[in-house]
Amino acid sequence: MEKTLDSKVVVVTGAAQGIGRAIARQAAAAGARVVVADIAKSKSTDADSGWLADSVVREIVAEGGTAVSSSEDISDSAAAARIIEQAVDTYGRIDCVVNNAGILRDRMFFNMEEAEWDAIIKVHLYGYYNVSRAAAPHFKAQNSGSYIHFSSSSALIGNLGQANYAAAKMGVVGLSTGIALDMQRFNVRSNVIAPWAWSQLIESVPIRTPEQGERMRKLKESMKAEHIAPLCVFLASDLAASVSGQVFGSRGNEVYLFSQPRIIRSVHKSDGWDAESLAATMLPSFQDDFIALKSHRDVVSWDVI
């Protein structure tokens, strides 16, 4: 019986742990040949220590799947290109890029250091661009392909202490839209997922109050990385042939479709505007439609379903 991703070759970055690992394993179970890309190394001192991506490959192979590992750093363009080259050299083609790799450098904006800004931008924005750009000529030549980029509710809605992360992850949305528009003539799709799931990234967030600790406990119990992977497998497959330029969310057993910025109200003044007329006319016309300044925890406040 044919599987959803039979004959597909899928590259998953950040695939050694958490969401990436779940995606790699579920993609392989759906018939894909997977490149498990991650720079993380085991902290173990035993004989099995080494690249964590290798252990995921072993898990996939033990379950009857097909996979190889890559330890290249996506923030370097030449290294990112080698990930795609490995996929093509090993399996003869590339069908889907899953840009999942990520890091956190959380700090309130007024205390943020340049190194904390640069590190986030290099991985999330440069890294996603680097891998995507390397795959583009192959997608164009074969007249098919799918990009899946991971953003965050911290960008789409907002969160405290993550100005760097939010900026990069909102940039990912713009990158995906640009790719979708530029590549649509070649039957190439590009979409975004904002995941809610327990991961090593969330585990690294400091807990400062008992309330935060309790919230983290609930997240760990109810929001599994495995809940995110089915949406990713769907978007990588031909079942999603009509889906491009969209922004999805996934949390527990829920899947969301996010709105995107569109003009919702306008005003016109034939002789032009000044600050006073904007205050007198534009402001009262617009203010009922202003988006309230809230964090994603306030906006998505219901329990995980």
Image (cartoon, rainbow, N blue to C red):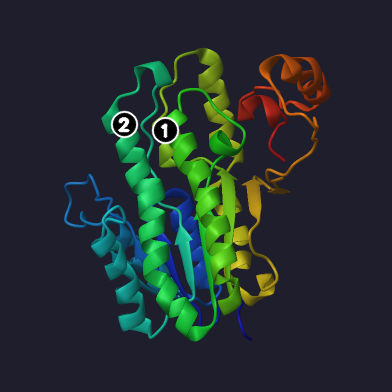
Q: Is tag 1's residue or tag 2's residue first in the polypeptide sequence?
A: 2
x%, y% of residue 184?
60, 72
Q: Badge 2: how crowded within 10 Å, few (<14), some, or many (20+)?
A: some
Q: Residue at x 41, y 55 (%)?
A: 128
What kind of residue is marked 1? Asn
Q: Quadrant of residue 288?
A: top right
x%, y% of residue 11?
42, 67
Q: Residue at x 79, y 25 (%)?
A: 286
Total marks in image: 2
Determine whether label 1 and label 2 are within 8 Å by CB.
yes
Residue nearest the observer in this picture, 201 or 256 = 256
Q: Residue at x 31, y 82 (%)?
A: 89
Residue nearest the observer in this picture, 254 or 65 = 254
Vertical placement of residue 222 versus 271, above or below: below
Residue nearest the observer in this picture, 3 or 93 = 93
Q: Residue at x 32, y 46 (%)?
A: 122
Q: Quadrant of the N terminus?
A: bottom right
Q: Quadrant of residue 36?
A: bottom left
Q: Quadrant of the C terminus?
A: top right
Query: In the rendered image, which residue does mark 1 sit on?
Result: 164
Secondary structure, mark 2, is helix
**Image position of 125 (left or right of 216):** left
Res 88 seen here: yes
What kind of residue is marked 2? Glu
**Image position of 273 (left or right of 148):** right
Residue nearest the observer in this picture, 56 or 134 = 134
x%, y% of residue 248?
65, 51
Could you tell me how far apart the alpha carbons at marks 1 and 2 are, in whole angstroms?
8 Å
Secondary structure, mark 1, is helix
Query: In the rendered image, which residue does mark 2 sit on?
Result: 116
